[in-house]
Image: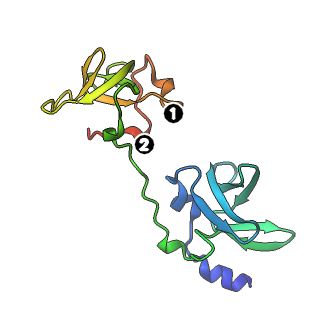
Amino acid sequence: MSKIITIMNENLNLVEILKDCPEGTKLYSPIIGEVEFKRIKYCEYPIVTCSKNGNRILSFTKDGLFFSEGECIMLFPSKDQRDWSKFKIKKPKFDQKTLQPFDKVLVKYLKDDYWSCDLFSNITKDGKIYPYLCVSGVYKYCIPYNDDTKHLVATNKEAPEFYRYWEE
């Protein structure tokens, strides 16, 4: 069995494959079935952590192996898909077109400006430089105000990767 696992895992590095994976992505382990990706944990060596129903945390090596009572168990993309080379995670980007009137947003005119709170109105039809119309004016940058972004208020820090729809 260990020879089969070694062959299946040749050059496999789940840490590299899953490093940009959104938390909550469904994966599969023969130990307990479907699990959700949590994060990559960096300690003595990096490990992939997953949870079952938001509770039990399981850890897997970069090779996708979990050790339980001396037995080697593999982590897979799904029950039916056992080939990691076919696993593709396309990290989604925020689509600013999903903003609705009266949504709470963070806005700024220029890249180095400080984020401020506002209420979204609409995307202007002819505003190429400052396309976002909010209660207090027009802006070049506009992202939702939520738990992922609230730490940005009154700072000029970069927005989380998911919300960076602009090209610099």
Question: x, y (%) of residue 90?
Answer: 42, 58
For the N terminus, give its image quadrant. Answer: bottom right
**Nearer-the-camera pick, 48 or 148:** 148
- Can you tell which quarter of the image residue 32 is in? bottom right
Q: Against 78, is 15 above or below? A: above
| Residue 83 in the figure: left or right of residue 2 | left
Q: What residue type is labelled 1?
A: Asp
Could you tell me which secondary element the residue under label 1 belongs to?
A: loop
The colouring scheme, among rainbow, by chain, secondary structure or one colour, is rainbow
Per the rendering, the mark at residue 66 is none
Question: x, y (%) of residue 15?
Answer: 57, 59
| Residue 11 in the figure: left or right of residue 109 | right
* Residue at left offset 26%, top offset 22%: 109
Q: How many marks?
A: 2
At label 2, counting other C-alpha atoms closer than 10 Å, the crowd grade (few under 14, some 14-19, many 20 or more) is few
- The residue that disc 1 covers is 148
- The residue that disc 2 covers is 162
Q: Which amino acid does label 2 sit on?
A: Phe
- Can you tell which quarter of the image residue 9 is in? bottom right
Q: Against 63, is 20 above or below? A: above
* Residue at left offset 37%, top offset 24%: 102
Q: Do the residues labelled 1 and 2 touch (CB within 8 Å)?
A: yes
Query: Which callout, 1 or 2, points at the residue further toward the start of the chain?
Result: 1
For the C terminus, give its image quadrant. Answer: top left
| Residue 22 in the figure: left or right of residue 109 | right
Question: x, y (%) of residue 76?
Answer: 62, 70
| Residue 4 in the figure: left or right of residue 152 | right
Q: Against 116, is 166 above or below? A: below
